Amino acid sequence: MTPARRLIAFHFAIGFGNLLLVHDTAVTLVTASPLDWTVIAVAGLAIAGFGYLSERQRFPESAYSAWNALPQKELTLLVLLCIVLLGAGGLSLLYDSGIWWLDDVVVGACVGLIGYRIVYGLVFPVPEAALGRI
């Protein structure tokens, strides 16, 4: 498998896998309020913007050297994702009403990641800088 296809498959697996976690919310988006749609759009644009800037080396070089120094990048991403999800889940348990926007952020981030990878992976080629990090 080429590095570009592996990156596309990895991002699709993350995006679609997380959408399956919140499929109840994704199914009820038909009845979502304008505020829900705003949160989804902002999260999606933020993830797509982060991916765009990251793959074009727009962040300081120290961020990339720290990332390259990690021994197992996928495991690190998984641990960070678990920490964020456990923290958000803990916060929702602290409050009876829960965090209403958490599912919206997850849906928006997943759709943003999938959409970005469709544009810069299937329609246009994956940037060379992204292939070097896989």
Image (tube, rainbow, N blue to C red):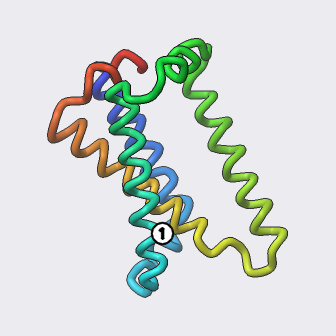
Residue at point 37% right, 53% down? 112
Q: Residues within 10 Å of mark 1 (few under 14, many from 20)?
A: many
Secondary element at tag 1 = helix
37 vs 116, left or right, is: right
> Which percent across, then down, holds residue 127?
26, 26
Q: Which residue is mark 1?
A: 39
> Which percent across, then down, holds residue 43?
46, 59
Q: Quadrant of residue 57?
A: top left
- Is 42 rendered above or below residue 115? below
> Which percent across, then down, holds residue 62?
54, 18
Residue at point 73% right, 60% down? 89
Q: Residue furthest left?
A: 123
Quarter holding the N terminus? top left
Q: Residue furthest right?
A: 94
The foreground one among 50 and 9 is 50
Query: Amino acid type of disc 1?
Result: Val
2 vs 108, left or right, is: left
> Which percent across, then down, holds residue 91?
78, 63
- Is 131 rendered above or below residue 81? above
79 vs 34, left or right, is: right
Residue at point 74% right, 52% down? 86
